[in-house]
């Protein structure tokens, strides 16, 4: 499945054809001819992605998830990621046989021959059964190792008597706008599939969480691609496919992937501990003009911020000696801080500079939907 971001304004399609040509032959004769031919900046490209596909696709997996939805009235409604796809028939058959069992589909990729798989949290969240299918056709029942709701990253594991194919991480910091990439996954439950395109933009914030820092891709990504990998031309995973913007439910060339520089440390922590402990102040922040700090708009009662002396109306200008440019940057830094550590804040209170030392707390799960 993929998170669909709706509510975008409709876009008008402008056609460029039959444009009038102004002037006659005499006018054209006065136009100077170019003397220097244009030199292409891009002279080579992949003739075929087939070698890349052969190398990496064996490590890309399809994920089928069942959920017991008996407590909700929505179990009679066909999921959007299933409707109109080959999974629809399978879903209806399962509904007849199992009553309240709900079937969804997603993607993932093996990062270790022992069977460690990376995917999106929303693919496996609240799953009763997780079934992983390899490109070879083999199926395994997976267990959840850990999940981080704030970044929508999850790790699951399967057990195989033989070593499994796997892919390696690449450095997303080296990815440039315009670079070729290839996305792989399980769109609409059809099975293993690949698409190619370029990186359209970096650092996209789509309002999913305070950690938004997506790569925007124009490679077609559809429901069922969630959790699949984005590869560079060396066959390294540089991003985790997560969301699409679409008024139709299908790809319109606006896909978003989490860069590997964000995914890798979270995956490693989940493998070691099964969860992510994040720092928390308990203050709501907002941007101020010119990106010169973050304004405190609310302080939670009995929170670390309140106990440390932070007040509504304060403007935070520095955190641990580093300049604070935006509220989101401040939130990210605090969330990345180890609970129990000390955060030194430089603030302006009624235009007067002050310094506060605040004991960073453990971020409650209830805050994962808000920016604190």
Image (tube, rainbow, N blue to C red):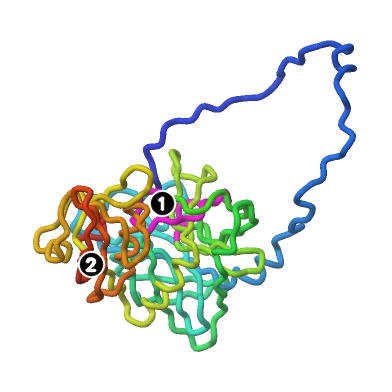
Q: Position of residue 226 (x, y in %)?
A: 45, 59
With respect to residue 12, does 337 lie above or below?
Answer: below
* Residue for point 25% across, 50% down: 295
Question: Which of the two labelled residues, at mark 2 and mark 1, occupies the earlier sequence position?
Answer: 1
Q: Position of residue 338 (x, y in %)?
A: 29, 74
Q: Mark 2 highlights which residue? A: 363
User: What is the crowding at mark 1: few (fewer than 14 residues within 10 Å), some, or many (at least 20)?
Assistant: many
Front one among 84 and 146: 146
- For residue 81, the mark is 1
Q: Secondary structure at mark 2?
A: loop
User: Which segment is the magenta one?
Assistant: 206-226
Q: Position of residue 317 (x, y in %)?
A: 31, 56
* Residue for point 55% across, 51% down: 217
Q: Which residue is the extreme one toward the bottom? A: 161
113 relative position to 28: left or right: left
Front one among 282 and 76: 282
Task: Please indicate, yes or no, whether residue 27 appears anywhere in the rendered image.
Answer: yes
Front one among 60 and 315: 315
Q: CA distance from mark 2 to mark 1?
A: 32 Å
Main SS of the magenta part reads loop
In the rendered image, residue 222 lying in the magenta stretch gets the answer: yes
Q: Which residue is the extreme one toward the left? A: 302
Q: Quadrant of the C terminus?
A: bottom left
Q: Secondary structure at mark 1?
A: loop
């Amino acid at each position: 499945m993929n998170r669909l971001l709706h509510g975008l304004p409709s876009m008008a399609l402008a056609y460029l054809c039959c444009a009038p040509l102004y002037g006659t032959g005499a006018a054209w004769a006065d136009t100077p001819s170019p003397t220097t031919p244009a030199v292409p900046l891009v002279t080579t490209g992949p003739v075929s992605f087939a070698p890349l596909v052969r190398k990496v696709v064996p490590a890309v997996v399809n994920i089928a998830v069942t959920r017991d939805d008996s407590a909700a009235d929505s179990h009679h409604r066909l999921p959007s990621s299933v409707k109109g796809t080959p999974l629809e028939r399978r879903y209806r058959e399962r509904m007849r046989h199992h009553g309240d069992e709900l079937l969804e589909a997603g993607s993932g990729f093996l990062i270790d021959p022992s069977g460690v798989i990376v995917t999106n949290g929303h693919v496996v969240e609240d799953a009763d059964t997780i079934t992983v299918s390899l490109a070879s056709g083999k199926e395994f029942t997976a267990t959840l190792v850990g999940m981080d709701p704030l970044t929508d990253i999850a790790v699951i594991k399967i057990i195989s008597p033989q070593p499994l194919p796997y892919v390696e991480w690449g450095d997303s910091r080296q990815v440039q706008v315009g670079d070729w990439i290839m996305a792989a996954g399980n769109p609409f439950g059809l099975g293993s599939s690949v698409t190619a395109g370029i990186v359209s933009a970096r650092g996209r914030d789509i309002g999913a969480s305070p950690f938004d820092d997506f790569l925007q891709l124009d490679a077609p990504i559809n429901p069922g691609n969630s959790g699949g990998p984005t590869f560079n031309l060396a066959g390294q995973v540089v991003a985790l496919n997560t969301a699409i913007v679409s008024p139709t439910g299908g790809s319109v060339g606006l896909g978003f992937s989490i860069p590997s520089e964000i995914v890798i440390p979270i995956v490693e922590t989940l493998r070691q501990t099964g969860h992510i402990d994040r720092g928390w102040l308990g203050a709501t922040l907002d941007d101020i003009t010119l990106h010169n700090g973050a304004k405190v708009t609310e302080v939670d009662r009995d929170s670390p911020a309140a106990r440390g002396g932070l007040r509504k109306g304060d403007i935070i200008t520095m955190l641990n000696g580093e300049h604070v440019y935006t509220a989101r940057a401040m939130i990210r830094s605090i969330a990345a801080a180890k609970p129990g550590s000390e955060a030194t804040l430089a603030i302006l209170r009624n235009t007067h500079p002050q310094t506060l030392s605040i004991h960073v707390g453990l971020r409650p799960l209830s805050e994962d939907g808000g920016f604190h």
